[in-house]
Image (cartoon, grey):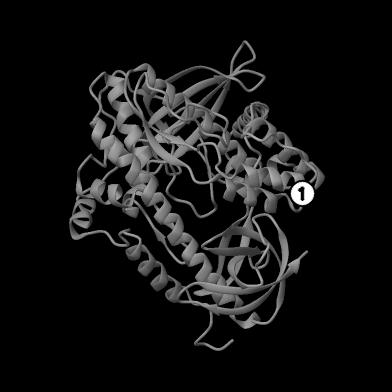
Amino acid sequence: MNRTTAPCRNQLKSIARRAMLQRGLLPDFSAEVIAQTNSIAHAAAAASDPSLKDLRRLLWASIDNDDSLDLDQLSVAEQLPDGAVKILVAIADVDAIVKKSSPIDDHARTNTTSVYTAAQIFPMLPEKLSTNLTSLADGMERLAIVIEFEVDADGAVGKSDIYRALVLNRAKLAYNSVAAWLDGTAPAPAPITKVPGLDDNLRLQDRVAQAMKARRHQHGALSLETIEARPVFDGDSLADLQADRKNRATELIEDFMIGANGVTARYLEQKGLPALRRVLRSPERWARIVELARDSGGNLPPRPDCRALQEFLEDRRRADPVRFPDLSLSVVKLLGRGEYVVDFPGQPVAGHFGLAVNDYTHSTAPNRRFPDLITQRLLKAALVGTPGPYSSDELNDLAGHCTDQEDNASKVERQVRKSAAALLLESHVGERFDAIVTGASAKGTWVRIDHPAAEGRVVKGFKGFDVGDHVIVDLLSTDVERGFVDFAGVRRS
């Protein structure tokens, strides 16, 4: 591969910026945003508020990706005398610095999310804030909204509360190393060993999270395990796209966040305030999911049933763990996308089919998602008994806008992943690959290959292919600028 075609970070950055603009997303901060950011010198200070709790003594820790600095949440557990465990989740108080309708807030409101491309991260908030002054950074005292809930031995969430607090992150931890330690395949990461008692506390958190997960799945939450492609660079050259999978540490955070988001939704309803709910309606392509199950020896009812689908998925995970992510990806595609809707007190609202919960909002990532910042402002109003900062019409408009922009951000990320895949595959034209069909509609047929973890379009020989089919394809061509990876279908495998 010569220098003109060598995988290059700058080429992918250019593609990412163009894709952002095409999708109505801002790749750069305005002069007004930069000026406001420059005027902020310190993290928000604790006010002399008697309701503000000082929880710096607790064994708070963050668990995130290896290179994450925009830390939104910390967690800690406390064993109770009756056998239950109190879980505390601290959420960064971003609103303490980012005020509604300020230049920084207007930028965040436009994009509504951080965009994570293979070449570059386009943060929702300036990095001076998201990775520092509004981040629950290691060793830093920070203001937070604490979501507290009790969990019994069966994983059921009981009593809960929400309040403001001062917290201190005692250990910045990473998913993979924590998971390996919890699984017993590696020693404890160094930050854990430096904080007396943190190892026991994390094991307690893990036990509670596993109980919560088991209970959710008993009620029909779906055991989905998709593969995410993570770029690996050698300097500025793209060396690979490697598959990231769920592990025990990601599950710990996921289950605590689901619990915290449920508590938040119910708290706002009890206080008579609207909430920006995250919903996933019953899948329109349930018939195809039934067909997929039948092809795998399963049997699903004719109408959408999350509990029956979960039982089928768990059976397939046990029977064929290697191919289970492929089945999961197919189901995810067929379930459709989630959306934001406004839940006004006393009015019915759709639940989340994939999580098998009715009360669910987004509240745990205000550095990265604007809906979470909206929810934080609603929570802070509820805590002091003042009217919410958004009108009903404004919330409805924001729900639709956040849904659309999240979709646009996903398309940008996918576009850059496809361009990265085209870079890696351009020297492999003519080779044959095993693949799984990830999309099949009037718009076209798409497949994913395992290594590199890449997706492309089947431009000929796709007749009879449908989502979930395992097929053999030949690589016909690549186009890096447009992110095209074109295959010819050979046969079902």
| Residue situated in front as seen by the camera: 266 or 29 | 266
Label 1 neighbourhood size at 10 Å, few (<14), some (14-19), many (20+)? Answer: few
Q: Looking at the image, is 332 positioned above or below residue 220?
A: below
Q: Amino acid at mark 1?
A: Asp
Which residue is painted at 49% across and 46% down in the image?
A: 337
Image x and y of residue 414, in percent: 49, 61
Relative placement, left or right, of 144 versus 301 is: left
Q: Quadrant of the N terminus?
A: bottom right
Image x and y of residue 187, in percent: 70, 45
Image x and y of residue 99, in percent: 23, 40
Which residue is painted at 70% across and 58% down in the image?
A: 469
Image x and y of residue 77, in percent: 56, 26
Instruction: Report helix, strand or loop for mark 1.
Output: helix
Which residue is painted at 27% across and 25% down in the image?
A: 381
Which residue is painted at 34% across and 38% down in the image?
A: 373
Q: Looking at the image, is 184 positioned above or below residue 349?
A: below
Relative placement, left or right, of 460 versus 261 is: right
In this figure, which residue is indicated by the disc labeled 1? Answer: 295
- Res 279 visible: yes
Q: Looking at the image, is 137 positioned above or below residue 209?
A: below
Count up the numbered dots: 1
Relative placement, left or right, of 293 versus 306 is: right
